[in-house]
Amino acid sequence: MLENSDKSYKVISAVDNPNLLEIADEVVLLSWPEFMLNDSVADKYFNRLYETFPEYQYCLIDNENDAAISAGNCIPLFYDGDPYDLPEKGWDWALQKGFDDQLVGTTPNILCALSITIHPAYRDKRFSRKMLQIMKEIGRSNNLKTLIAPVRPFQKSLYPLIPIEKYINWRDENNLPFDAWMRVHEQDGGRIIKSCSESMRITGTVAEWEKWTGQRFPESGSYTIYGALIPITIDCETDKGEYIEPNVWMYHSID
């Protein structure tokens, strides 16, 4: 169990509890739009994180009622390039590369954040920053000096027509990032590197997209949907819908 000085909750990893995936799913399924759970790279690898990299998957548990407060996921990988050369494929790249490196025995030198999700009942209680700090501590305990993160600026879903390159430069009245999640990262020492315009790619049939969103798509075109950072593209002739999510690379030194 990871160390924690706050007795109101405990931090557990998949090393401590082999059922952590089920506990984490209680948080994730309440928090994410359904279409976001259908990324093909995640379908292949995400659940395997809990078996292959158990020490990097963790949850906060409320000591009063044993409820899951939040779930965090990260992965070690090898990257020796310039941070400004991190790939456009972002999240999908990081998840697959971590498994590819592990398969061939490459020693990791960097930690990549994959997800931090807070249960709706525990939001606005500063758990986001706590989860980020715990992730950094996991990196330190595994001799990793750097954390990179393909951050999902979730408030951009309110501005789906604004290019990601413009949105990530928006600032509030305190000259902090306009986006709340980017702001948490920056206040905890992270810096914006650049956007990654193809961080996740989600495809499905028109019927699948209608199921995932509860909307109808009667003709081909671009559509805004709840929770998406940019419009999705529907092609009725090929019976295909596609969403290519942009994120923003952020960098933390954790030594």
Image: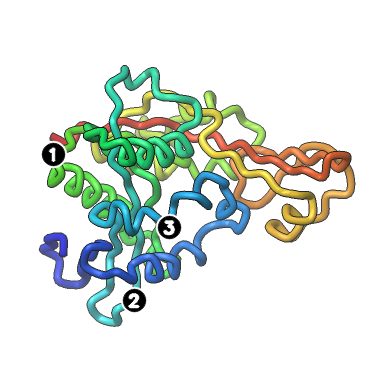
Mark sitting on residue 67: 2
Q: Quick check: can you spot residue 186?
A: no
Image point (54%, 28%), residue name:
197
Three-letter code for the amino acid on which mark 3 is drawn: Asn
Expressed as whole percent of the image width and height from the top left, the position of residue 228 reads: 61, 45
Q: Nearer the viewer, mark 3 or mark 1?
A: 3
CA–CA distance in space, label 3 to label 1: 24 Å
Q: Earlier in the sequence, mark 1 or mark 2?
A: 2
For residue 236, what is the image quadrant? top right
| Labels 3 and 2 touching (C-beta < 8 A) | no
User: Which image quarter holds the N terminus?
Assistant: bottom left
Q: Nearer the viewer, mark 3 or mark 2?
A: 3
User: Which image quarter holds the C terminus?
Assistant: top left
Q: Secondary structure at mark 1?
A: loop
Q: Report the label total.
A: 3
For residue 110, above or below residue 116: above
CA–CA distance in space, label 1 to label 2: 31 Å
| Labels 1 and 2 touching (C-beta < 8 A) | no
Mark sitting on residue 47: 3
Three-letter code for the amino acid on which mark 1 is drawn: Asn
Q: Earlier in the sequence, mark 3 or mark 2?
A: 3
Name of the residue lying farthest toward the front: 104
Expressed as whole percent of the image width and height from the top left, the position of residue 147 reads: 27, 36
CA–CA distance in space, label 3 to label 2: 21 Å
Expressed as whole percent of the image width and height from the top left, the position of residue 153 reads: 48, 40
**Circle 1 is placed at which residue position?**
143
Three-letter code for the amino acid on which mark 2 is drawn: Ala
Image point (26%, 70%), residue name:
17
Q: Earlier in the sequence, mark 3 or mark 1?
A: 3
Q: Is residue 104 left or right of residue 179?
A: left
